[in-house]
Amino acid sequence: MPTSRVNETGLRLDDRLERLRLFGLSSPAILLILVVLVIPVGWLFYVSFVGADGQFSLENYQRMIDRASYARIFATTFKVSFLTTGICILIGYPLAYFMSQLPPRLASLCMITVLLPFWTSLLVRTYAWLVLLQRQGLVNDWAIGLGLWDEPIKMVHNMTGTLIGMVHIMLPFLILPTYGAMKSISRDYMKAASNLGATPKTAFWTVFFPLSTPGLFAGALMVFILCLGFFVTPAVLGGGKVIMVSMKIVSNIELFVNWGAASALGVVLLSLAVIVLWVASRFLNLDQISGGGH
Amino acid sequence: MKQKTLATIVASLLATTAMADGKQVTIASWGGSYQEAQSKALFEPAAIATGIEVKQESYGGMSDVRLQVETGQVTLDIVASGSGSAARAGAEGLLEELDYGVIDVTDFYPTLYSKYCVGGDVFSTVFSWNPEIYGADGLSSWADFWDVEKFPGRRAYRGGVAGALEPALMADGVAPEDVYSVLGSEEGIERALDKIRELRPFIDVFWTSGAQHAQLMKDGEVDMTTGWNGRFDNAAKDGAKVTYTFNQALLDYDCFGVPKGAPNRDTAMAFLAEISKPEYQDDLPKYITYGPTNRAAYATGVIDAATAAALPSSPENAALQLPISLEWYAEWETIAAEMYQEMLTE
């Protein structure tokens, strides 16, 4: 008995030392997260409850309720984010599927064409769309020249232009994880399905698609969350009519003489993003998405 | 130590008295061609004449000053700013009161200096149009800008409240001199907003920067827009089809202020006094098409008649315009800006 107890305490001590060592190793990362994330977000949260007079106040939140424009700005932000994510899925999924079925060399060529714009500055791509889509832009000029339509079509300085620009910028974020998930699906599964008498369509929907969803959901979630905070593209391509939360944050900093008015918006947006993640986690296995569990 | 003292004595004998005192100021402005013009016309010559050493920086506006004042780490002595934001910053206690015993403003246009800010240049918010569509003398009033039957076409308008409500009221038939008294209530602001709502279906773009509204005309994206006169002149020089008038324009100015607790407050006042003199201000139009705030700058003979006629602050042009009321902006801008945003998001 005594020996086993000695063993037990020895093991427990070892265990504790091990944990301490692991903590020591991860402490720089924990410190970094603390300094660059927890403290600023905490400060943001605190400042949002400070009124114009420097006292505790709910006025920054009250204002969002009193003024209808705030609700409309949040609605626009979510609408743009949902639509962008939806269009990205519709375009990105078939493309990722196509690439996953190509021979390796062609697939990597396709991958380069997907990644190339990804490496170009966001600002450059946004202004490029402005040049392409405007009234006397390339697209209208060519279409009129070819007789496709007679009058210039309004494609920019509105919701259409904003969505075109954002989908273009967000597409790689959807394609990359989806493609990754598809590549890891063994072709033998599809062969097995066919062998058991499934038509190609049935095999795709019952075998391939469910296996590719973790990648798709990961991409879609990433696109959606990134869209919520978008600034440059809607500001340039929206013509001042598509106003998203990030733009209102900037104008509130200029307008009200305290940071609270802007940080309250940040807090609400952050909370809404967390709620979206939480709801998503109810339906999806987030562990699977982040690659944690199998 | 002895050598250093000797050097100082020699220096003070050689240099002007100011230089011996080691006087210096740090000036922050908006950068780009605007600051370059200020630098060539105002800062550099004034530094040589006064012996005050000038350090230049570019900055992001009054929010930078706010941060410096709030944290007690003020490094800027003089900041260039729009008149409206300077007025609000002054009301917030972020700026020093200017010493008009030192800065001579006897020849200034009375509306172009205030307690916290002394005018540096004058610009106008005008309406501009494509002369190939409407002719060189196409539009003559804000009512024309609103008249979509007589002047059909796409329009651009400011996406912020500054300089956006006054034109709407003038288009609604309010006399320029009554605009600010009408705007002095929420009903008056709502009246202006209703007039903009009326034009909204024809407004393609709500612009947010000077570069943007110039580009919109350059690209032919819109047929008419509001905007700042200097930008349209530059765009026209680049071949854009754009012209404008000063009729019913809003006369506005950029100004210089001194942040609260500036390290070289007194030197800053002396330097502002120097660059406010007509002999510096008359050089500014050589580098940018913005006018002097000191009336006497027109009398030095440096600004020729043709240049003067094109400047917003020439007596003839100034007479056509409505000067911006800083009092109104200090009192109403925050409320009006929120109401403007309501209108934009509808």
Image (cartoon, rainbow, N blue to C red):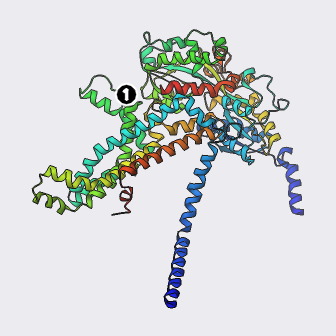
Q: Amino acid at mark 1?
A: Arg
Of residue B213 and residue B315, the one placed in the foreground of this image is B213
Q: Is residue B290 visible?
A: no
Lateral position of residue B208 relative to residue B31, left or right? left
In depth, the one of A238 and B23 nearer the eye is A238
In front here: A57 or B249?
Answer: A57
In the figure, A33 relative to B148: above or below?
below
Viewport quadrant of the C terminus of chain A = bottom left
Q: Position of residue B210 (x, y in %)?
A: 54, 31
Q: Residue at x 68, y 16 (%)?
A: B315
Above or below, A270 relative to A146: below
Chain letter of the residue carrying label 1: A
A88 over B5 or under it: above or below: above
> x and y percent of residue B293 in the render?
71, 25
Q: Give the side of residue B299 with respect to residue A27, left or right.
A: right
Q: Residue B4: x and y, percent?
A: 86, 60
| Residue B3 spot, x, y in % from top left | 87, 62
Q: How dense is the environment of label 1, judged by Cα within 10 Å: few (below 14), some, or many (20 and up)?
A: many
Residue assigned mark 1: A135
Can the viewer see residue A216 in this picture?
yes
Name the element at disc 1.
loop
Residue located 55% across and 74% down the image: A20
B238 to the left or right of A83: right
